[in-house]
Image: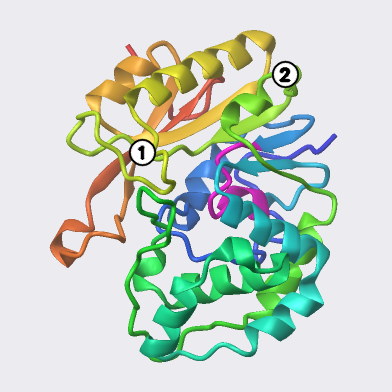
Amino acid sequence: MPSFVPNARPTNIATYSPIKYAGGKRQLLAQLLASRPPTWHRYFEPFAGGATLFFALGLSGAYLSDTSAELINVYQVIRDNIDILIADLGRHCNREDYYYTIRALDPETLSPVERASRFLFLNKTCWAGLLRVNRQGRFNVPFGHYEHPNIVNADGLRAAHRVLQTTEIAQADYQAVLPMAQPEDFVYCDPPYVALSGSARFTEYTAGGFDWADHVQLAAAVYTLARRGCYVMVSNADVPAVRVLYRGLWSQSVSARRSINSDATKRAGARELIITTYPVSGAERLR
């Protein structure tokens, strides 16, 4: 059973996510680590995204899932075919015309390694690392115009490969965790956030989106897991609708910098909630 002291620095903290992710949690990592339970059995992250917390913890026998086939394929290839992936990444170049040629490829016509290589290349060279698709499921983020993007981060990819060796990786939504999570398991949920305006509009990272009804259903699942004796932590925007949704649980409001707004003056000062089903030092009950 993994056992950690709250606020302790994991020994493999240098293992960062291999994916540049606009919704990533690197800037909130210290608060997330401080908010984890002191001990737990198995770790689940059903909205994997960049999986920042997972890679920081470096746990064996964890479970990662996401609805994005592209994202899940990347993690599976990093786990199972790291040398071939690194070699394939080396063929890419940071040119705008080349970027749009690779972006136009249908990922379903590619091998798993070629598909993962395409995803990582686009991720490192697109604007702001934004993972966004249109309603047809096609990646539609423009070229980022970075001077020296780190397309082939071999050391980082190999570090991620080592962490992923004993990890179960699945294309599934968060509800797949419900029959698997047992008492004293730790489940971290980082869904697409509620819009800062508090309205039922959400950033779409997948073609299907994640609307208000999905947030209501997720909250119900969190309460179900809590009653089972699981430790659940949720990240979301600090807006009144979310506070009402998780009434009775513990929360901390933390400052976060939004990195995907085209207006740089609007990227700072956002507030996020770290919600837990267990008490955490400094947290307050949502009422």
In the rendering, which numbered label is found on residue 193? 1
In front here: 169 or 112? 112
x then y, percent, for residue 63: 73, 40
x then y, percent, for residue 287: 32, 11
Tell me where residue 140 sits by quadrant: bottom left
- SS of the residue at dot 2? loop
In front here: 197 or 6? 197
- SS of the residue at dot 1? loop
x then y, percent, for residue 37: 64, 30
Q: Where does the N terminus fall, quadrant-wise? A: top right
Q: Is residue 51 magenta?
A: yes
Give me the residue at 23% from left, 56% from top: 268
In front here: 99 or 241? 99
Give me the residue at 69% from left, 83% from top: 88
Q: Is residue 125 above or below residue 234?
A: below
Tell me if residue 258 can be seen: yes
Q: In this view, does 10 lie above or below 216?
A: below
- Amino acid identity at mark 2: Pro
x then y, percent, for residue 257: 30, 55
- Amino acid identity at mark 1: Tyr
**Residue marked by disc 2:** 179
Tell me if residue 9 can be seen: no
The boundaries of the magenta stretch are: 45-56
